[in-house]
Each structure stands twice: as structure tokens, then as C-alpha cells.
Amino acid sequence: MFNKVLVANRGEIALRVVRACQELGVRSVAVYSEADARAPHVREADEAVCIGPPPSSQSYLLGDKLIEVAKQTGAEAIHPGYGFLSERAWFARAVRDAGLVFIGPPAEAIEAMGSKTSARQLVTAAGVPVVPGTTEALRDASEAEAIADTFGYPVLLKAAAGGGGKGMRVVHKASEMASALESAKREAQNAFGDDAVYVEKYIQGPRHVEIQVLADTHGTVLHLGERECSLQRRHQKMLEEAPSPAVSPELRARMGETAAAAARAAGYVNAGTCEFLLDRDGQFYFLEMNTRIQVEHPVTELVMGLDLVQWQLRIAAGEKLPFDQKSFTPRGWAIECRITSEDPANGFLPSTGRITHLHVPSGPGVRWDGGIEAGSEIGLNYDPMLAKLIVHAPTRLLAIARMQRALRELVIDGVETSRGFHLRLLEHPDVRSGDITIQWLEAHLNELTGAPATADTIQLAAIAAALAADHDRNVRSAGAGEPTGGAAAGADTVPHRDAWRAVARRESLRRD
């Protein structure tokens, strides 16, 4: 095992890697921009080095600087987390060329899977089903129209080097193709520095289901079940769960074997994820491979009972996986909500400010992966995700109830967050039954983000105000912290309990 690892990231994933290092007896080196000087990952690491101003282009994206800091501090390996440089083949190669270990796949595997077109070619040769489409970048709109005619409309234009919905356009008819292609190419160039766009058949009403894989340097490739990631807004995942309510044990095995075949074809090592579209008939199609640890990896950890980040470190250090495929059957259900500093009622606009109060939920089966604390300054330099709230329970419905309970306990004051949005999402009958598709959330956004005040919430606010005033009077008259009279007598009833919570949460009632 390594003696020291540099963590080339920030926020919750940096803290997650630092903790994994601590448990393995590995010293950690945090890097931080000037904006993150007081961040939890900086404090928790054994060492910390400032690498530049707040903009990521002047700090977290400086590969040469990160390698220099690793060498100066005596780190033997670099863990890139997710985002930033985690899927940059040139960075993985530079780390290796510097005599250090990149905690992730080889640069060649990142390269092979980094372009959607090359990935499609690679996995098709390995017998992996892909959505019908091209494997070469489009030359012009006329070529795109000719290909679309063979598939039938609608079709989907996708950036070859892309992700996160950038450079994607749905085209419903030939007359839309030229403008859509021009727009997709322009967005792809701005986002990825590569304007290559290809076309594929647009599968209507599919689910987004991904398979976690884990591979060592000794030839073992394991698939660790699926994650349901269909609840997306603008191609950004909002809530994930494992397993998927749409996947049977037989389908899980077939999808898992397919993901493992794709990983082998790429010469993959370490943790990675194969993403698939799953249609209503149980047919699945390879989309892409994420050559890094995923944001939603905790749901797999909880249902499979292993620490993926620790195994990233172990594999990079040369350890052999001691498991076989039969070791992995999902146990129970896990759900993850991404808690972001956005205002759902105002088009998910970013919310900035200082977190003045933070209360993290706890109790059975509740996990908080966060990179914030009271006093944290939330700005616009980085992704708005503040933390991930994850729960695990024996059944899906109990996991939903547990997540609702945990969300109600969560208090983040000072910025608007997605907490109330997630509560409303989990109350929807379609979500509770698991009857969702990739398009479901976009179609229901208005009803989930409007959140007008109801008679119940208005009454609850009035009760809360009355109870607060009664509490203050009792404290002043009795000289003690325990209220008497009506407030104490009704403390165990549901309306009073909820009212006291509303008082304690202050502004959170308004945001819900």
C-alpha cells in the first residue's frame, strides 16, 4: 500500500478519498484553491497545499502543478476523484510518466472510452449492443439527414467527446437538422474543444441504468450490479438508487456480463461505470463508459457491502481482488439525493452565500457525504453540489420513507437548496412505484418546483409562531428551559412536533 496519496480534487469527493486513506493507514495530501482554504477536506488531510486562485482553470485543472505538488510532498500516487482531470488521458499519462501512480484506469483505457464514437466502435467489436447510429463524426447536415432517414425520426445528435448533456440535440424532422447540428457542434466545441458530433436513433421512453465494474491488474473484472439513474434534469442526475426497480436478477446478470465485456475490450483497470439505455421490452444499449469513480457510487457500496474508494487505492497499489462474481448480490435498497445550492422554484438558479447553520441527519441507515459545514462560503466557481444524502433499508418503500425522514431532519440555512424539491419528488406516485423514464422529470418539473403555499403549511406556520411565543413566555416566567402548560402537554402530538421542527428550521419551512 502507498505511504502517501495526493487528492487532486475538492469538496465531498476529496473528503471521501481522505477518509478512505485514513482507514487504510495512508497519509493524504489535500490541494485547495484560495476559495477552499477553510474547506473540511483541507483540514482533515495530513497535509494541504494551496495551488492557486478560485477559478478551476487556475487551480484544480493545472495538471503540471498537481504533479509538482505530489513530488514535493513525497506522494506516490494521485487520486483524481470525479470531474476536473479525472477522465483526461493526458493527465493520467503525465502522472505515469512522472513516476507516480494514477489511481484510475490506464491512460489508454481513458482514451479508448473518452470518445463516444471510438467507444462505440470498440464495444461493438466486442459484441456489446449499442443504440443504432454512426461510429464516425458527421461531415455535414446532408449526411446526417441521410442517416436519419435510415433510422427514422426522431434522432439524437451527440458530441463525440461530450457528457452531461452538452452538445446534444433531439431532431424530430429533416427540416430541423441543419440548425440542430450547427448548434450541437458549437456547444461541443465550447464545452470540450472538439466539435465532432455523431447521430444515433432516439430511443423513446427509456431508463438510464448503469453498471458498476471493478477490475484489477491481475485480469479479474467484476460487475457489481446496477444503479437506476433515470431521474434527470437536462441530463443531470438528481436522484439515484440501487438496485433498479426495472431490473430482474436475470437481466442484471446479462447487463453485468455485457459491462464486463466492454471493460475487458478497453483493457480497463480500477473502478468504472458502463451506462446503458433500457427500454420497456428489456432491451439495453451501451451509451458510454465513465472512466472514474461516479458521484453515485455510495448506493452500490451500501447494497453490495464494500468500499469502492478503498478498493481503488488497493487496486492501484497492485492488490488482487479477493472476490468472485458470486460474491455480489444486492442486499436491501439504497437511494441517493444530490443536495445542491440551487433554487428549484426559480429555474434551479445557483444560490450563493454563507451557510449559517447546518444540521446533518442521522439515525439507522443514513449516510452523509458532504464537503460543507457551518461557515462555508458557497460561490459560483464550482459545481453547485454541496453534498450527497444516502440511505439504505431492507426494501425500496422503507428506503423512500427513510430518505424522507432524513431530508426533513436536514437543515441548511444561508443558501437555497434542492432539499424541498427532493421531498416533493419522493412523494410523487410514479417515483414511489418506480414507473419512471429519462424524460419523466422534465415532464413533471412544473408541479415539482412550483411549491405554492398550501392551507396546511400556512396553518403549520401559525402554530409554530404561537408555540414559539408560548415557549418564550414560559421560559421567562419559569426561569427554565422546559415549557409548561399547553406546549408541554401537546409535545408528543404530531401537529406540535412538526411545529417545533418548523421553528427550529427557521427558514426551511418557507423553502419547502
Image (cartoon, rainbow, N blue to C red):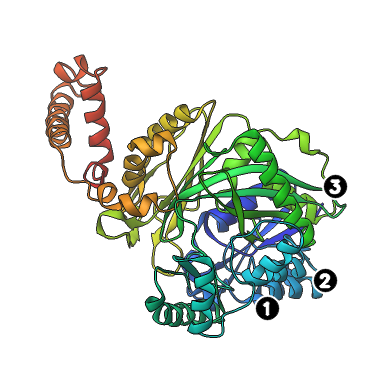
Tell me the CA gap for discs 3 and 1.
Answer: 31 Å
Q: Earlier in the sequence, mark 1 or mark 2?
A: 1
Discs 3/2, front: 3
Which sits in the foreground, 441 or 270?
Answer: 441
Q: Is residue 23 above or below residue 386?
A: above
Q: Residue at x 48, y 66 (%)?
A: 152
Would residue 198 be visible to someone looking at this image? yes
Q: Residue 225: where, in percent of width, then height?
A: 65, 41
Residues tagged 3 and 2 counted as in contact (Cβ below 8 A): no
Q: Residue 4: where, in percent of width, then height?
A: 75, 58
Q: Which residue is mark 3?
A: 320
* Classed neighbour count for the residue bearing mark 1: other residues with Cα under 10 Å, few (<14), some (14–19), many (≥20): few
Residue found farthest to the front: 150
SS assignment at label 1: helix
From the image, which quarter does the C terminus lie in?
Answer: top left
* Classed neighbour count for the residue bearing mark 3: other residues with Cα under 10 Å, few (<14), some (14–19), many (≥20): some
Tell me the CA gap for discs 1 and 2.
Answer: 13 Å
SS assignment at label 3: loop
In the rendered structure, which amino acid carries the disc numbered 3? Answer: Lys
In the rendered structure, which amino acid carries the disc numbered 2? Answer: Gly
Q: Which residue is mark 1?
A: 64
Q: Which residue is mark 2?
A: 99
Q: Earlier in the sequence, mark 3 or mark 1?
A: 1
Q: Residue 171: where, in percent of width, then height?
A: 42, 70
Q: Residue at x 88, y 52 (%)?
A: 218
